[in-house]
């Protein structure tokens, strides 16, 4: 008996997860809701556990491989240029939708919901983020919850990339003495990739559990007060994902159908996990094996894009949200304000790398425009629902740009791209 394709398995898992989520929410089945949450959390934790070793070993290996590429500088420059081009298009769409739909003028949310966020963006965060706190970019944070202090560990992927690049360059420049380390790194990378394939096989189960848990936790009732804002966001996300990205692919001689067929597993996982970092291992897999991007370039471009390429969180969302806040408080914006929004969106995602993207990007935009930061609190009620679509677009862009740059440099391996992805 032939096993269904990976895409079909994921679709079936999502359908079952949605059904279970609606049952748990409609009938108050606490055990089912808890089960969905536990399974989903475990799946995301497995992916996150692989991010640090995969990113570190992959980038060190890519530095070693880049020795044999004559166009490394052009690849890096092309990556940044296309980051900027796609972000500029996305923020322009956001500004147009915010101006036409006027979401702030039609909001039903109470002014009492305006709360100044605990986290705010700063242009200095980019400079701080470039300097690793330690070799793996690990960071500890402590917060007070239920009267008790809780400490959690996280990692800054941008710092991890900087450390891995430095170590990779040092190993290459060391010459013969660095060869054993590079050989060990290549072996470790192969091992972690094998583990990744095992985890990826759980995607249908994990995706269904995450989607079902999201239905249980958030529902859709809270959308009523901010319906116009949510509609504007999702229209913008859909335009970028299904219009702008296909046009960019066609303009570069690439097939949109083939791109989405390869990248869809990562886009789906981004939607339900709401984390580009958790999706990173899968994104890297589909870029290499589904889109034919050489590992030496993808191992650098995809992790870097996962921290700095956020068309959903850093372009569409802050543009529409900033206009929402201005309209809600009756503060007029002028041409220079619109230009500032564009500037923040194109450059701001890099400046907030390693932090909570959407909230930090919004507060960074509001503070740059001189708008009240409390306005960000008006939108927090439906942020998880919006974050699903934002992250899906982020992940799609993180796969798109390396594919375009590799295609323009003549590096796409057609035979490898034809191989099944994550099957």
Image (spheres, helix red, strand yellow):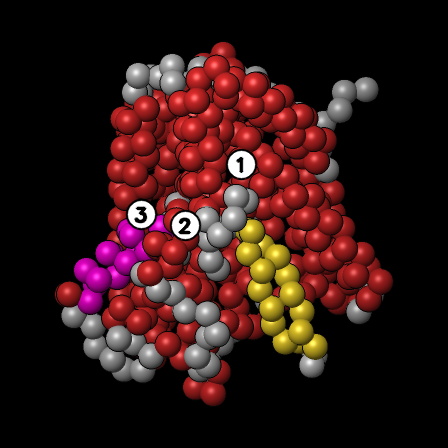
Residue under label 3, please give it.
Answer: 87
Discs 1, 2 touching: Cβ within 8 Å = no
- In primary-sequence order, the first of circles 3 and 2 is 3
Is 78 placed left or right of 292 in the picture?
left
Residue 4 x %, y %: 72, 27
Is 399 placed left or right of 251 in the picture?
right
Residue 303 x %, y %: 47, 38
Residue under label 2, please give it.
Answer: 131
- In primary-sequence order, the first of circles 1 and 3 is 1
- In primary-sequence order, the first of circles 1 and 2 is 1
Quadrant of the image for the N terminus? top right
At x 34%, y 75%, the residue is 325
Q: Nearer the viewer, residue 307 or 331?
A: 307
Q: Quadrant of residue 234?
A: bottom left
**How far apart are the two marked residues, 1 and 3, measured between alpha carbons?**
24 Å
Residue 293 x %, y %: 44, 23
Farthest residue, direction left: 335
**What is the chief secondary structure element of the magenta stretch?**
helix
At x 56%, y 51%, the residue is 138
Judged by depth in the image, the label closer to the viewer, 1 or 3, is 1
Labelled disc at residue 55 = 1
At x 65%, y 65%, the residue is 151
| Segment colored magenta | 337-350
**How far apart are the two marked residues, 3 and 2, measured between alpha carbons?**
25 Å
Q: Nearer the viewer, residue 108 or 378?
A: 378
Under circle 1, the secondary element is: helix
Q: Residues within 10 Å of mark 3 (few under 14, many from 20)?
A: many
Residue 338 inside the magenta-drawn segment: yes
């Amino acid at each position: 008996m032939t096993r269904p394709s990976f895409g079909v398995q994921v679709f079936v898992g999502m359908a079952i997860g949605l059904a279970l989520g609606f049952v748990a929410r409609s009938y108050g089945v606490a055990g089912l809701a808890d089960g969905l949450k536990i399974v989903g959390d475990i799946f995301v934790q497995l992916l996150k556990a692989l991010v640090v070793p995969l990113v570190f070993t992959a980038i060190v290996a890519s530095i070693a491989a880049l020795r044999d590429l004559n166009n490394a500088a052009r690849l890096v420059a092309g990556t940044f240029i296309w980051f900027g081009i796609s972000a500029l298009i996305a923020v322009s769409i956001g500004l147009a939708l915010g101006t036409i739909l006027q979401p702030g003028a039609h909001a039903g949310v109470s002014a009492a919901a305006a709360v100044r966020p605990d986290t705010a963006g700063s242009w200095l965060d980019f400079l701080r983020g470039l300097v690793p706190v330690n070799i793996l970019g690990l960071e500890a944070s402590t917060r007070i919850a239920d009267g008790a202090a809780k400490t959690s560990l996280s990692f800054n992927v941008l710092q991890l990339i900087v450390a891995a690049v430095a170590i990779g360059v040092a190993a290459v420049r060391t010459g013969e003495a660095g060869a054993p380390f590079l050989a060990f790194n290549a072996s470790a990378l192969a091992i972690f990739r094998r583990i990744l394939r095992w985890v990826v096989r759980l995607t249908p189960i994990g995706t269904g559990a995450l989607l079902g848990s999201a239905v249980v936790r958030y529902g859709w009732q809270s959308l009523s007060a901010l319906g116009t804002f949510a509609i504007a966001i999702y229209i913008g996300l859909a335009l970028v994902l299904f219009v702008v990205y296909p046009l960019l692919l066609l303009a570069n001689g690439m097939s949109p159908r083939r791109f989405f067929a390869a990248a869809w597993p990562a886009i789906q996982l981004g939607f339900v996990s709401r984390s580009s970092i958790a999706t990173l291992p899968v994104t890297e897999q589909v870029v290499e094996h589904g889109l034919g991007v050489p590992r030496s370039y993808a191992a650098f471009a995809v992790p870097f894009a996962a921290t700095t390429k956020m068309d959903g969180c850093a372009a569409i969302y802050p543009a529409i949200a900033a206009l929402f806040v201005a309209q809600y408080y009756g503060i007029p914006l002028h041409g220079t304000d619109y230009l500032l929004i564009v500037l923040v969106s194109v450059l701001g995602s890099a400046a907030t790398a390693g932090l909570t993207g959407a909230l930090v990007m919004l507060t960074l935009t509001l503070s740059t425009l001189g708008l009240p930061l409390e306005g960000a609190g008006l939108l927090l009620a439906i942020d998880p629902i919006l974050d699903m679509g934002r992250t899906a677009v982020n992940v799609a862009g993180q796969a798109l740009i390396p594919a375009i740059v590799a295609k323009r440099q003549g590096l796409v391996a057609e035979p490898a791209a034809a191989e099944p992805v994550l099957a």
